[in-house]
Amino acid sequence: MALNRTEAASLLVLAASVVFGMACGAGDDSLEERWAQLGVPEPETVFLGDFTEEEKSAITREVKSVQVSFAERFGIVTSEFTPYISTEFEALNEAYREWLDPDWRRRGVELPSWFRCGGLAPPKAIFIALETCDEETRAYGGPIAHEYFHVLQDHLGLVGGSQFWASWLMEGAAVYASTQYAEEQGRWTVEWRRKVAHLQWASLGFCLTGSPLCSEGRDASQAHLTGLVDEVFQYQIGFLAVDWLVERRGEEALVQFFRLGGGRHEFEEAFDMTPEEFVDGMEEVRRDRAPSFKWQLRGSVLDPDGRPVPYAHIQFMMEVEDERVGVLGDRANSEGEFTVYGPDERHTLGVFLKCPDGSRAYWVCGRVGPGGLRGRR
């Protein structure tokens, strides 16, 4: 599952020339020839909501493009899945409920309310909501590459070991694969993704001991931010871990890991290293490229009338190669007070609040003073 992935998707901006090229079907002849050589049927994409024929064509092409890219890179391909792509959350949610096993329908399972720009890949299906995505993200159908790699994991026979290894390396591998694809398409680079992930890890202040996490002298519990911490851990640090493993053992080892089942024993067999060796290597990466933020900022969040704003998320907004990214900070308490660790330069503060529909909106810092942090939308 590619996370709220609202956060991740919102960080990625395509150049207008790339979107224009996709909309006009640039390179279609070459792609169609390469895709035909795969010898698989065309997945039947289900479009829900408001799409033009040009948009449907571009997204269908994107699915084929991802299949070709991953077949050539990883040596695996499947069309045994159905993509459901919708511009309306409720329409996608209804399709998801219909797709579910009757037992799960009776339990009232449905997509979470925040799932309005993101993707999910249960076995043999992909569900993507584009309702709140920007135009560039919508133009290529959102996180198709990420979710298709999850389809491939299932196709290989992944069963997973412990929760730590299964979720962490599953998501990290999907980020790794989709990042490689994005660089091929000229959307963003692998190095850009590494820099973002390093900043996210630095914001946590955690070192890696295998499982669970450890701290470096600060309060590492962050119980009220567990969801965001897990997200950074699985997607950002998971990507760095897979990137590190591939650099040392190759993409063939990554495929072998999932083909074997994806557990701890399978990890040793596929990557030819013990978990302890892996942890030592990742700790070296953290010390060299993602040292914990040390600068501490205390303050409070106030509304325009000077009243405390409780439970707002405070994040550092940073520039990475001319793209703005949000780096995890902390959540204000019931009185609007917060303490965050951050970088010592090149940032502004972002205040994220939850809207009535469950989505998130943010205010960029307008002024910090003795009375608190006053933001503007």
Image (cartoon, helix red, strand yellow):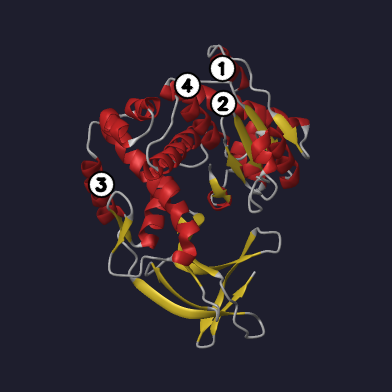
- Single out the mark in the foreground, 3 or 1: 3
Q: Residues within 10 Å of mark 4 (few under 14, many from 20)?
A: some
Q: CA distance from mark 1 to mark 2?
A: 8 Å
Q: CA distance from mark 2 to mark 4?
A: 10 Å
Residue topped by disc 1: 35
- Single out the mark in the foreground, 2 or 3: 3
- Single out the mark in the foreground, 1 or 4: 4
Q: Earlier in the sequence, mark 3 or mark 1?
A: 1
Q: Nearer the viewer, residue 86 or 369?
A: 86
Circle on res. 279: 3
Q: Earlier in the sequence, mark 2 or mark 3?
A: 2
Q: Earlier in the sequence, mark 2 or mark 4?
A: 2
Q: CA distance from mark 4 to mark 3?
A: 30 Å
**Who's the residue at 23% across and 50% down the image?**
284
Circle on res. 65: 2
**Who's the residue at 65% across and 37% down the image?**
103
Of the residues shown, which amino acid type is indicated by label 1?
A: Trp
Kindly indicate whether the residue at mark 2 contacts the one at mark 1 (C-beta within 8 angstroms). Answer: yes
Circle on res. 71: 4
Tell me the SS state at disc 2. Answer: helix
Q: Position of residue 60 (x, y in %)?
A: 66, 27
Of the residues shown, which amino acid type is indicated by label 2?
A: Ser
Kindly indicate whether the residue at mark 1 contacts the one at mark 3 (C-beta within 8 angstroms). Answer: no
